Image (tube, rainbow, N blue to C red):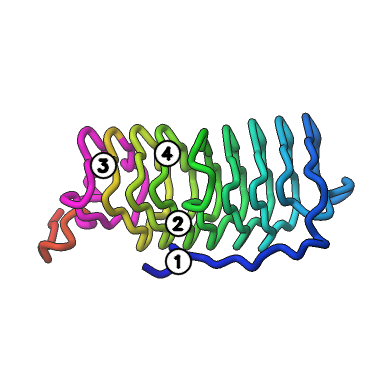
Amino acid sequence: MCGLTHNFPAQPDYLILASMEFYDKIFDPNSELPVQWVQHDFEQCTFKNLNLSAVTFTKSSFINCRFENCDLTQAALPNTKLDDVTFVNCQLMHIDFGLCNPFGLRVDFYQCRLDYAVFLDKKLKKTQFIECSVKEVHFLKCDLTNALFDSCDLELAKFAENNLTGVDFSSSYNLTMDPDDNIIKKARFSRHNLPGLLTKYSIKIMD
């Protein structure tokens, strides 16, 4: 399936610098930023108003961190740890979260643009997607138990082989999903979601 596999070029040896640890630090355009973002540890750090598009974060670790108003479009996350990381008003398009370190993956998204992102075989229990653009995002073989999609645009988002137990879609829109291809026990939908749940039957829902 398109978008699930990426071959990232090897980082040149002369660009691999010593790993560093950062604690309780704010990174913004006026800060001294790392020369490269590979194999560093960040804990309780905040990233504000940064252009991090297409940056490689291979084997870096982010614990209890926050990204605000950052552009991370096409950022590369091979074996990157995201443990209790919050994204607020960020551009996160074309990111393959399936490449992240699966251990301790905990993320939340507020007013973010996630279009064309991929979540493959990830545990995303209780993840919050609040007022996000989730267009053409692929959720494949994920555990989204009790996740919340609050006022999200799910146009052409793909849900396949997921555990959607208790997920709340009731305030989101443009949802299309095959209920037979996901576990949807106790998931919450609104009546406006019904056409998208019955698409394969080619029937019309009349008011």
Q: Check disc 1 and report the residue beneath it.
A: 3
Looking at the rendered structure, the number of numbered marks drawn on it comes to 4
Q: Check disc 2 and report the residue beneath it.
A: 118
Residue 74 drawn in magenta? no
Amino acid carrying mark 4 in the image: Leu
Amino acid carrying mark 3 in the image: Phe
Q: Residue at x 20, y 52 (%)?
A: 181
In the rendered view, would you say 157 is above or below 169? below
First-in-chain label (2 vs 1): 1
Magenta residues (range): 167-196
Q: Check disc 4 and report the residue beneath it.
A: 124
Closer to the observer: label 4 or label 3?
4
Marks 2 and 3, Cα distance to the nearest angstrom?
23 Å
| Label 1 SS | loop
Residue 45 versus residue 193: which sits nearer the camera?
45
Q: Check disc 3 and report the residue beneath it.
A: 189
